[in-house]
Amino acid sequence: MEIIDGKKISAQVKQEIADEVSRMANEGKKIPHLAAVLVGNDPASETYVASKVKACQAVGIKSSELRYSSDITEEQLLEVIDKLNADEDVDGFIVQLPLPKHISEENVLNRISPDKDVDGFHPCNVGRMVLGLPTFLPATPAGIVELLSRYNIETEGKHCVVVGRSNIVGTPMSVLMSRKAKHANCTVTMCHSRTQNLKEITLQADILIVAMGVPRFIKADMVKEGAVVVDVGIHRIPSDKTKSGWQLVGDVDFEHVAPKCAYITPVPGGVGPMTIVTLLKNTLLACSRKHA
């Protein structure tokens, strides 16, 4: 069993990005600029945006935060997006989800210019991904493909089972793994909360990618010997084994599943770090495209 070390791989990718940004600066080219829009004060969103800003600083990418109270209207937020779309200095931007209930996430995501949609959520970019055309790929699924690639994990012809069908992870993950491309070419089965005989299907998986949103949902008896397991979930649960009184766990019961695996991602330190570096890669791509 080998641990897939997302921290180590993300550090490698960050260094590659930093080298490229440094080269651009030395040649007098524009430095990439990523903006993040944060509405309200959701603790998880606060933490995520802070880590994005820190990651930008580490690689030399310019970053800016736009913070608004949770009572901002949808119309006002759409005006903010219009200004960012028109701002020549901003190469890419994200609107941190979730948004307050009175604001339509669909309207907000659709308003972002596809050329600046570094989260890869705009319907145009999703469509280009499905067709296998150059585009901004959703950060978490693309980060997972990067991990499989850097660990030289064979994917061609393998049965990949994706558990979860969200538009952010599960659905794009299934598309990327089935594409006719290097580090893809899998036969993909997508499972979700309505899937019958789930255990029967997960036991067939050569590569099992879990984004169910339920702590320790995948048990050892649901995983076959020698499988590759990628855990996208992250949950804070009470624990009497830590000083803080809580611990972070994933959607996979790591302690019991890991011994059966050929490879497995830990939580934390697996998929999470790759999500942010993919966002940085997309920002670099957005800048390079615009100023080619």
Image (cartoon, grey):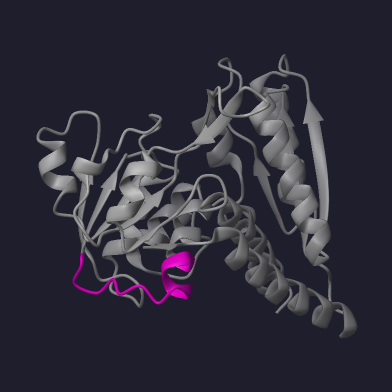
Residue 287's quadrant in the figure?
Answer: bottom right
Q: Residue at x 32, y 40 (%)?
A: 165
Identify which residue, 195 or 92, lies in the foreground. 195
Q: Image check: 101 left or right of 95?
A: left
Q: Dividing the picture into quarters, in which one does residue 178 lie? A: bottom left
Q: Residue at x 32, y 39 (%)?
A: 164
In what quadrant of the picture does the N terminus appear? Answer: bottom left
Residue 177 percent across, percent down from the top left: 31, 62
x, y percentage for residue 243?
67, 27
**35 left or right, relative to 265:** right
Q: Nearer the viewer, residue 107 or 61?
A: 61
Q: Is residue 113 magenta?
A: no
Quarter of the rendering containing residue 277:
bottom right
Relative side of 161 to 172, left or right: left
> Can the viewer see residue 98?
no
Q: State yes or no: residue 156 in magenta.
A: yes
Q: Residue furthest bottom?
A: 27
Front in this rendered view, residue 226 or 65: 226
Residue farthest toward the front in the current orientation of the protein: 241
Q: Residue at the spot x=59%, y=25% of the render? A: 246
Q: Position of residue 216 (x, y in %)?
A: 37, 33
Count of numbered marks: 0
Q: Where 221 falls versus 184 (above or below)? A: above
Q: Mostly what secondary structure, the magenta segment?
A: loop
- Residue 292 sits above or below residue 84 on the image: below
Q: Is residue 201 visible?
A: yes
Range drawn in magenta: 146-158
